[in-house]
Amino acid sequence: MIIIKRTQKIKDLVNKSHLDGNKIGFVPTMGALHDGHISLIKKSKSQNSLTICSIYVNPTQFNNIIDLNKYPVTLEKDIDKLEMADCDILFLPSTEEMYMNNEIKEHYDLGMLEHILEGKYRPGHFQGVCTIVDKLLKAIKPNTLYLGKKDYQQCMVINKMITDKKYEVRLEICETIREPRGLAMSSRNLRLNEVEKIDALKIIETLINIKKDIKPGNLEEIKINATKYLTKNGYKVDYTEIADAATLEIVSDWDGKAKLVALVAAYLNNLRLIDNIIL
Ligand code: PAF
């Protein structure tokens, strides 16, 4: 695997690679890689002649400095995992290059996606995500971008950004990879102790209960019950919501036809967990 740190170097390499007729698949990450990330790498490997992974803990998408400082960094292990997965190139940009001092900050119009769910509880987060993904796409110019469905709203936000900015990139949203008992894989899980790993299963249980209990009509009660279940189990809940799977518009009354997604964000002790399932 080739490791590249300079933006100009990755630009030169991908330009040459495009000229040579390669299809480039790109997996952006913030490191602390797990099997979810590796499944994206493998998907990209199966569809492209060149797979690029980036690792960059992007400061502008953290709305909480403590969360940023505690974000797990496991670069040596990440490199091993990427080599095992046969990733072709690892891009490790620096903050100096990603955020030049005199650069004018771009504002992305994300419509209502900016203000609901994650947007409501993590103000500015999606602007930061778009800023960095925009920069990475400009440098790497991939044919396909691979993202995990666990960050459902992030996928929709990035989809809007690439559509609005007319990027010629196909977005492939890949299934969430789970631990054997159902916990969605996440870099932040490294911060869970053994007891918390068991308690964290309540998140997927809540989502499965919603899927089991949902019926057409008013959905308030089912959402309230989901919140109560998590609160009773020691969580501090940001939201338990049901939304249209295509638009992420919150659904209060279900006609029994629209495809829905249930989403949860809640704190287990000091760790914020998110997950979702299609209903
Ligand atoms: O999902 C992530 O890890 C990050 O939000 C991303 C897409 C790599 C942008 O920093």
Image (tube, rainbow, N blue to C red):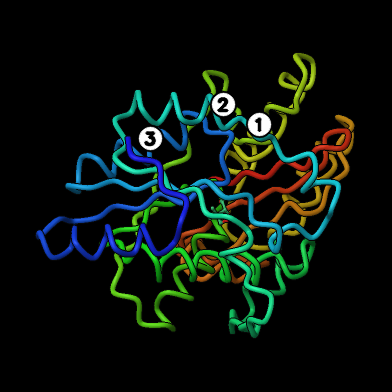
Q: Nearer the viewer, mark 2 or mark 3?
A: 3
| In-front residue for pair 42/237 | 42
Q: Nearer the viewer, mark 1 or mark 2?
A: 2
Tell me, for residue 39, which label it has, or none.
3
Give left or right: position of 156 versus 265: left
| Residue beneath the point at 35% across and 53% down | 26
Considering every residue shown, the one lying at the far left of the view is 21
For the residue labelled by badge 2, is the local secondary structure a helix, a strand or a loop? loop
For mark 2, does the 10 Å Cα neighbourhood hold few (<14), some (14 to 19), or many (20 or more) residues?
some
Q: What amino acid is labelled 3 in the image?
A: Ser
Residue 206: x percent and y percent? 69, 37
| Residue beneath the point at 57% across and 65% down | 98
Q: What amino acid is labelled 1 in the image?
A: Glu
Q: From this view, report whether residue 211 is shown above or below residue 81.
A: below
Contact check, label 2 and label 3, Cβ < 8 Å: no
Q: What amino acid is labelled 2 in the image?
A: Gly
- The N terminus sits in image quarter: top left
| In-front residue for pair 202/54 | 54
**What's the distance in space between the residues labelled 1 and 2, CA to CA?**
8 Å
Q: Earlier in the sequence, mark 2 or mark 3?
A: 3
**What's the distance in space between the residues labelled 3 and 1, CA to CA?**
24 Å
| Residue beneath the point at 75% across and 14% down | 194
For the residue labelled by badge 3, is the local secondary structure a helix, a strand or a loop? helix
Tell me, for residue 205, which label it has, or none.
1
| Residue beneath the point at 56% across and 39% down | 31
Contact check, label 1 and label 2, Cβ < 8 Å: yes
Considering every residue shown, the one lying at the far top of the view is 194
Q: Which residue is mark 2?
A: 182
Q: Earlier in the sequence, mark 3 or mark 1?
A: 3
Location of residue 217 by image quarter: bottom right
Residue 123: x percent and y percent? 77, 68
